[in-house]
Amino acid sequence: MKRVTGIGGVFFKAKDPAALREWYKNHLGIDVQDWGGTVFRWSDDDSQAVTGTTVWNIADVTTDYFDPSAFPFMINYRVDDLDALLPVLRAEGCDVMDETEDSEYGKFGWVLDPEGNKVELWEPPPGQ
């Protein structure tokens, strides 16, 4: 069974998310959207579009989305089959969170690594 197949997103907190988003937009050229982040579209070596995206987002420092982790960042990893992977991780003794989410954006599950970092596992919707 495949486990992680890539990075689906990078999320981090900021004391002043609006100012930090503006800095990334102005200085690094990131096309920050109204929702607070951007979606990087994948391309091959010839700059031809391929299926896949990576999300980048700055959240307000007060968000509880990263809880129970105390760290100000979270990595989202793409997986092939979330429903198959979560029980395997539990059986291996990993701290898998009970909550999962199934939405138009795909399936989401979470696990805490041994240092308490919340890790988001994402199975993209079909065709992505």
Image: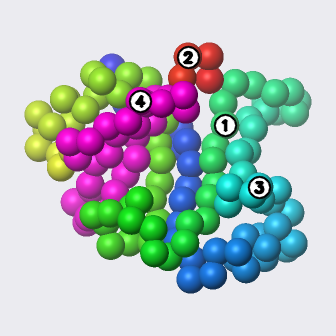
Q: How many marks?
A: 4
Crowd around label 3: few <14 · some 14–19 · many ≥20 (10 Å) = few
Disc on the earlier residue, 1 or 2? 1
The residue sitting at 21% across, 36% down in the picture is: 89
Residue 57: % across, % down: 62, 58
Quarter residue 104 falls in:
top right
Label 4 sits on residue: 102
Three-letter amino acid code at the position of disc 2: Pro
Label 3 sits on residue: 33
The residue sitting at 66% across, 30% down in the picture is: 52
Residue 82: % across, % down: 35, 28
Q: Which residues are magenta?
A: 97-123
Is 1 left, or right, of 88 in this rendering? right
Q: CA distance from mark 1 to mark 2?
A: 13 Å
Label 1 sits on residue: 53
On screen, residue 113 above or below 47: below
Crowd around label 4: few <14 · some 14–19 · many ≥20 (10 Å) = few
Mark 3 residue element: loop
Q: Quadrant of the N terminus?
A: top left
Q: Nearer the observer, disc 2 or disc 3?
A: 3
